Image (cartoon, grey):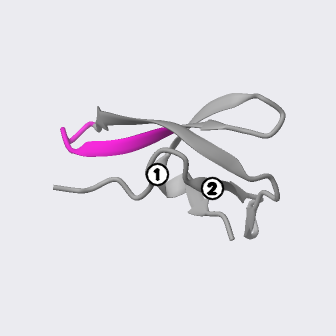
Amino acid sequence: MPSPKYKINDQVNKKRNTGISLKIEPKVGTIIKVKEKLDSRKRICYYYEVKWPDKRRSEHAQHILTPAP
């Protein structure tokens, strides 16, 4: 069984694919919710709801996020 990489209140950055390289966004967000979803092969994948400093919220897959320094 896979396990979640992040917990609630962890600080994260979002990866951004620029086509040539992979960059890390400078904004630091906070995990506020962890969700389990099934992929097309019926395996569990973890998605996180992130609250950003400008009060926006967004949902991202585990592989898109990196721990904040």
**Residue that numbered label 2 is attached to:** 12
x and y percent of residue 6 in the render? 45, 55
Residue at the far top: name it.
56
Q: Say whether residue 41 is magenta.
A: yes
Q: Is residue 53 left or right of residue 42?
A: right
The range drawn in magenta is 40-48
Which residue is depicted at the point 43% across and 50% down?
A: 7
Q: Quadrant of residue 44?
A: top left
Mark 2 and mark 1: Cα distance apart in space: 11 Å
Query: In front: mark 2 or mark 1?
Result: 2
Disc 2 residue crowd, few under 14, some 14–19, many 20+, Cα 10 Å: many
Q: Which mark is residue 62?
A: 1
Residue 49 in the image: above or below residue 30 = above
Residue 21 in the image: above or below residue 14 = below
x and y percent of residue 11 in the render? 62, 55
Q: Which quadrant, please, contains the C terminus?
A: bottom right
Callout 2: SS: strand
Q: Which mark is residue 51?
A: none
Amino acid type, residue under disc 1 in the picture: Gln
Q: Is residue 19 left or right of residue 37?
A: right
Q: Quadrant of residue 50?
A: top right
- Given residues 58 and 40, the one toward you in this image is 58
- Given residues 53 and 2, the one toward you in this image is 53
Amino acid type, residue under disc 2 in the picture: Val
x and y percent of residue 68 in the render? 66, 64
Q: Which quadrant, please, contains the N terminus?
A: bottom left
